[in-house]
Amino acid sequence: MPAYSDQYWNSPDGLKLHYRDYDGPRDRPPILCIPGLTRNARDFEPVAKRFAGQWRVIAVDLRGRGLSDHDPKTADYTPPVYAGDLIKLLDQLGIADAVFVGTSLGGIITMFMALHDSERMAGVLLNDIGPELAQAGLDRIAGYVGQEGSFAGWDALAAALAERNADVFPAYGPAEWARFARRLAVEKGRKVVFDYDPGIAEPFHAASDAPPMNIWPCYEALAGRPVTILRGALTDLFALDVGERMASAIPDVELVTVPNVGHAPSLDEPESLAAIERLLARVLARPNASDV
């Protein structure tokens, strides 16, 4: 793995938030990686392994995850608040443009940011997420998010994850489940626990009980920059017809289906890495790309 430095920034409301900073050239926009609901910066190790050095890669821990502070006000675990945190980070680092790579919730945050600050976006990859979500996937997530599981060790967690997610990653073997576990959890005392604040579940469940928001205008605000949409072929959250409508709604969109993967592609698949490579080439091909 390439080297990185652990860095921190302060949210608008004073939380200390963490990101991994993998060094790369400063004459092109960095790749800003935003994880899913229960995930953290470690999810983007495959992206850093492939692209760090050629590109600066910044992988964030959203508030309540990883090395970032937990929020005492759980009602603030929402996309608009996360978006405000990321705008503060970009302002602090003096970054005018970035290539946004958002997995699941990270993609929703990206779309929210686009509605108000799309000029920040040199390019966008949305990983298994769109402006409409399938109920089956939401129900599945609701069934586990916020549960404070603890495990006797890494092998026990890997076995539990394999049982719960066998249909999401059917090609995974013991080595892949062990790696999956290390990205999702941490050791505390003699136990292994999930690396997020269980309080993130409260706004998620509240949103599930409310009428769905129309975030198509947020997605449409991405018009004018290269966009790549990844979709797991086995996903239960992101319907193919939604992806196809997204691809036709704005120009310069590539829709890529990653075979034999559910929600969400882990970004180490050859198809995913190739799609990111093509997106970055499109970013560099844009007029004045060397000036961003």
Image (spheres, grey):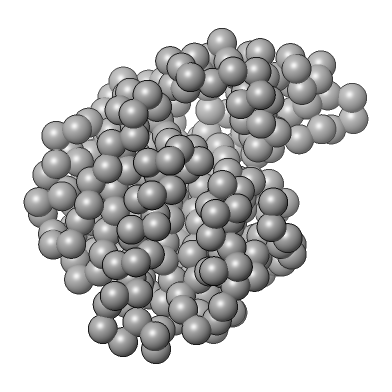
Determine the residue located farthest toward the right in the rendered image. Answer: 189
How many marks the image carries: the answer is 0
Determine the residue located farthest toward the top in the rendered image. Answer: 163
| Residue 129 drawn above or below residue 140 | below
Classify residue 66 as left or right of residue 233: right
* Residue occupying the point 16% across, 48% down: 246
* Residue occupying the point 19% across, 66% down: 223
Q: Is residue 206 visible?
A: no
* Residue 56, percent from left and from top: 56, 69
Q: Nearer the viewer, residue 145 or 173?
A: 173
* Residue 101, percent from left and from top: 43, 56
Q: Is residue 53 visible?
A: yes
Residue 53, quarter of the rendered image: bottom right
* Residue 58, percent from left and from top: 58, 63
Residue 286, quarter of the rendered image: bottom left
* Residue 252, percent from left and from top: 18, 62
Q: Nearer the viewer, residue 204 or 195?
A: 195
* Residue occupying the point 53% across, 28% down: 145
Classify residue 189 as left or right of residue 160: right
* Residue occupying the point 39% across, 57% down: 277
Classify residue 72 as left or right of residue 62: right
The C terminus lies in quadrant: bottom left
| Residue 158 drawn above or below residue 46 | above
| Residue 266 drawn above or below residue 41 | above
| Residue 113 drawn above or below residue 287 | above
Q: Nearer the viewer, residue 1 or 10?
A: 1
Classify residue 175 as left or right of residue 124: right
